[in-house]
Amino acid sequence: MPRGPILLIPLNIIRDFVKKIDSNAFERDTIDIFLGFDVDEKQIFVVYKNSELDVTSYSVRSYPK
């Protein structure tokens, strides 16, 4: 059960983010992406390789500021 906000991130946002970093990523069987939080836990990021995409705005419920 989520203890914080629930994210609904459109898959095309993640796809475009990953393709921008690694154009061959979707030719492989798997792609490892992670969710990360800033130090104060006020922002949520999708992390792929050494790049981050802020996805806080895709929270269904407001994330505490």
Image (spheres, rainbow, N blue to C red):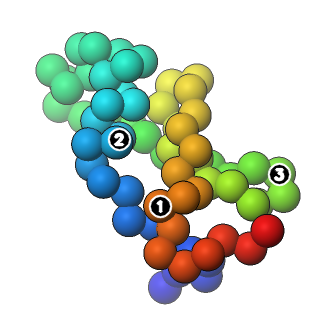
Is 44 displayed left or right of 12 in the figure? right
The C terminus: image quadrant: bottom right
> Considering the numbered disc 3 on the image, is that residue within a helix, a strand or a loop?
loop
Give how far apart the Cα atoms at labels 2 and 1 are: 12 Å
| Disc nearer the start of the sequence (2/1) | 2
> Can the viewer see residue 35?
no
Is 12 displayed left or right of 63 in the figure? left
Residue bearing the label numbered 1: 58
Vertical side of 37 occupied by 63: above or below: below
Give how far apart the Cα atoms at labels 1 and 3 are: 19 Å
What residue lies at 75% left-to-right and 60% top-to-bottom? 42
Q: Which residue extends farthest bottom? A: 1
The percent coordinates of residue 7 (x first, y second) are 45, 66
The percent coordinates of residue 62 (x first, y second) are 61, 75
Give the quarter of the image for residue 23.
top left
Q: Nearer the viewer, mark 1 or mark 3?
A: 1
The percent coordinates of residue 52 (x first, y second) are 57, 34
What residue lies at 68% left-to-right and 55% top-to-bottom? 43
What residue lies at 26% left-to-right and 42% top-to-bottom? 12
Vertical side of 31 occupied by 55: above or below: below
Is 49 displayed left or right of 10 in the figure? right
The percent coordinates of residue 20 (x first, y second) are 37, 19
Vertical side of 3 occupied by 36: above or below: above
> Considering the numbered disc 1 on the image, is that residue within a helix, a strand or a loop?
helix
Residue bearing the label numbered 3: 39
| Disc nearer the start of the sequence (2/3) | 2
Is 23 displayed left or right of 57 in the figure? left
Residue bearing the label numbered 2: 14
